[in-house]
Amino acid sequence: MKLRTYKLADDFLDVALKSLLREEEKNNLILGISMRVRDGRKYGKEAPLFLTVHDGDALIAAAIRTPPYNMILHCEDDRLDALDVIADHLIEVGHQLPGANSTVDVVSVFAERWTQRTGTPAHVSMSLRIYTLTEVIPPTNVSGHMRWAREEDILTLVKWFLGFNEEAVPDDPPENPEENVRQFMKTGKLAVWDNDGMVSMTGSSRGTPNGATVSAVYTPPEHRGHGYASGCVAALSQSLLDDGNRFCALYTNLSNPTSNKIYQNVGYRPIVDCATFSFGESKE
């Protein structure tokens, strides 16, 4: 096996894209982040990390990291030994790794290997599921309509982004939530559900060659229970399909049964379970 590293997302995608596209929906995160870096998106102050592992001419694993965020892994199911090569390389170059994300089978093995080599404990910080949609089932009896976010909405949307992060990823607060909102509006889509005023939001800020990812789904507590999130997710998903995307994808936190039900009701179907492992002592 041979490991290759890349300074540029373009070079990484030149090598890895064909293999990652074989399971595009499952690989939406590693593809989406790589494509955003290629297009100029900055994540943190450190240079991103891109690498692949090959057995002869075959790509059997890939990984990217945009510090300070976790590493995103891809590995062929029958070649999990490639994860040893990745772990050994990171240790050899002194790379400090806070955590990793992938499908459950892949990231569990990598976390085990990392702990064996470094002595650093690993624990699951989030259990996730990827859903994809190719046809929307519009919800009924939801008052209001979707519209695109506007400049005058930004102060409210900043509060909602903070609320979303507090509920969905409390250990990863945004450094600049207003910048996040404006990034969605500038390079992606940010939708709100309006029922005599804003009551819910959802957005899409990254995609793959044939798909778009839905994220940042949030309804303030005082507006929950009326189907607004369902209406907003369904309408945004339909817009993304109308743009020419073959599918929409999204991640759910398996600890939230309500959101998992909402997405399935509008046409999303589960394809694979994932997990995020954090390295170090658990804060719980």
Image (cartoon, helix red, strand yellow):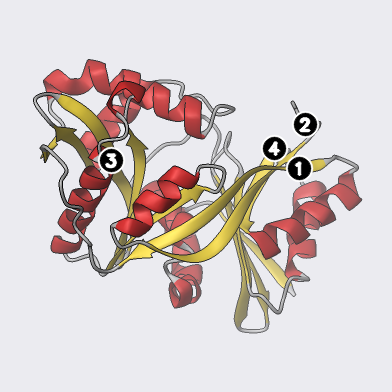
* Disc 3/disc 4 C-alpha distance (Å): 32 Å
- Residue farthest bottom in this picture: 57
* Residue type (three-letter) at the residue carrying disc 1: His
Query: Which residue is label 2 attached to?
Result: 282
* Disc 4/disc 1 C-alpha distance (Å): 11 Å
**Number of numbered markers:** 4
* Residue 22, position as x, y percentages in the image: 46, 77
- Secondary element type, mark 3: helix
Query: Which residue is label 1 attached to?
Result: 123
Instruction: Write down the quadrant of residue 69 in the picture.
Output: top right
Q: Disc number at residue 209? A: none
Residue 6 visible at all: yes
Query: Which residue is label 3 attached to?
Result: 229
In the picture, measured across the screen, residue 170 lies left or right of residue 55, that is left
* Residue 113, position as x, y percentages in the image: 83, 56
The one nearer the camera, 103 or 200, is 200
* Residue 236, position as x, y percentages in the image: 20, 49
Say above or below: 274 vs 163.
below
Q: Nearer the viewer, mark 2 or mark 3?
A: 3
Q: Are marks 1 and 2 in contact (CB under 8 Å)?
A: yes
Q: Nearer the viewer, mark 4 or mark 2?
A: 2
- Secondary element type, mark 2: loop
Query: Which residue is label 4 attached to?
Result: 98
* Residue type (three-letter) at the residue carrying disc 3: Ala
* Residue type (three-letter) at the residue carrying disc 4: Pro
The one nearer the camera, 78 or 269, is 269
* Disc 3/disc 1 C-alpha distance (Å): 31 Å
* Residue 43, position as x, y percentages in the image: 46, 36
Q: Are marks 3 and 1 in contact (CB under 8 Å)?
A: no
